[in-house]
Image (cartoon, coloured by chain):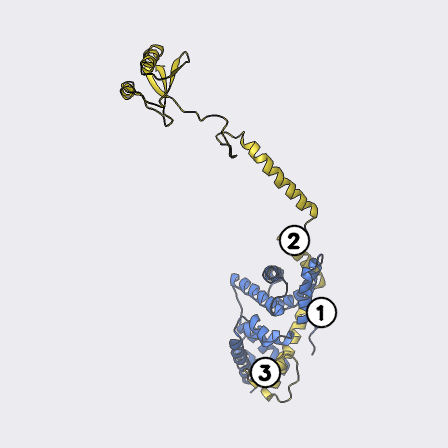
Chain colours: A yellow, B blue
Amino acid sequence: MSREDGRWSKDEEDWCEILAGKEVDDASEENREVGEQLRAAILAQHEEALMSVSQKELKQGRERLLFRLHREGLLKKEPRKMSPYIGLALAASFALMLVTTPMLQQFLPGRQLPLSGPQLSKQFEAPQVLYVADPQAAAARCAGELQQLGLEVEIIDEELSVILVVQLADRPPGAEELLKKWELVPTEAEQIIVEFIRK
Amino acid sequence: MAVPKDHYTYLSNGELVALLASFAKPGQRKGSIEKLYDCFAPQFHAYLIRRGCPNSDREEIIHDSFVKFIQHLDKHQKKKGNYCPQHPKAYFHAIFRNSYSAYLRKQERTVNLVGLDELLAYAVGADGEETFSLRETFRKLYKEYTLSNPLCVFAFEQIALEELSQKELAVIIDKTYGATRQFVKTCRERFISLWQACTS
């Protein structure tokens, strides 16, 4: 036992040296007498206890410890080297993912295409709905009045309803009053899209 | 009397550091753990036998200590890149002592301490005749002191059985360096005064 600085008094140092079985020439009598006997008692008890531990018990204990370490994942902690093929496989998987993800998204409902560029179809705008007793007659009368103002009116007859599509790029005089009369609301694109449906 | 090292593989500090370093070598971890077990398990068993720990509980306490020590080594390897913490032997003994303390806390201890009067009666003989046996009296005193001051005896045993430095002793008994010095001083004085009471 090495003394590492001078803070320990000689008595404590000698006590430790004697307990550790080292020769201390100038130790005090009580330190020597008690220290040596204490060491002898410790070693005797230790040996007695060691003798009572059977090799079989130790061997079985070792096997059970290894099993427990294996179960707790502590038996094999060696760093694993990555195979070069694993890196190649990961790169190929990533490339495949980049290609297939946009393709798969086309089939997902309610998702817009993530790619930039012109859209292939116009956004659908829900038409304004007017409930009338006779859709065909009401649509014809409304279309006639719009056409009298010089507006182009597209009439789409769907049998159960009639849709009018009117471009309002240049609103002629009298157009505002007509829109109020029929309670028509132009869209942001300056259009009238109205569907006449039977009450 | 020499330390009975022929009952187990004794490892010096340097040998233990070399053994722990082999944890990092591919394919050697299991063998290193087995060797670690062969070196420390007999000592731990002996310690628990001396304290009267039942056979059924000894193995669990020892295994808990090994698991915690190996977990600590792995953490150290992750942080520092090697399996050699500072004062590994002292640290392992400290873990073992903590495992034993945790076990004791769970138990209902029913230890009968040997009284000083009983010791004195044994030393001088009940009928006053010369039946005094220095060695036997000392062993009884040591046993009594083991029960009444387990940490003191633990420290004495570590000094006697292991080649530990003062700093390592501080690690084992979980005290600062200065407190360890004071602790050894107090234990020594107490033990000597007990002995002097028996022999005077």
Identify the mark at residue B7; answer none if there is no mark.
Answer: 1
Q: Residues within 10 Å of mark 1 (few under 14, many from 20)?
A: some
| Residue A105 pos. (x, y %) | 54, 32
Identify the mark at residue A7; answer none if there is no mark.
Answer: none
Secondary element at image label 2: helix
The image shows residue A8, relative to residue A74, as above or below, that is: below
Q: Which residue is drawn at 65% across and 53% down?
A: A70
Secondary element at image label 1: helix
Question: Which residue is at the front of the view, B27 or B99?
Answer: B27
Quadrant position of residue B187 = bottom right
Question: Which residue is at the front of the view, B198 or B192?
Answer: B192
Could you tell me if the residues under marks 3 and 2 are in contact, i.e. CB atoms within 8 Å?
A: no
Q: Nearer the viewer, mark 1 or mark 3?
A: 3
Question: Which residue is at the front of the view, A121 or B156?
Answer: A121
Residue type pointed to by label 3: Glu
Mark-to-mark CA distance, 3 and 2? 44 Å
Quadrant position of residue B7 = bottom right
* Chain where mark 3 sits: A
Quadrant position of residue B64 = bottom right
Secondary element at image label 3: helix
| Residue A193 pos. (x, y %) | 37, 20
Mark-to-mark CA distance, 1 and 3? 29 Å
Query: Are marks 1 and 2 in one subunit?
Result: no
Mark-to-mark CA distance, 1 and 2? 27 Å
Residue type pointed to by label 1: His
| Residue B147 pos. (x, y %) | 55, 72
The image shows residue B74, relative to residue A137, as above or below, that is: below
- Label 2: which residue? A70
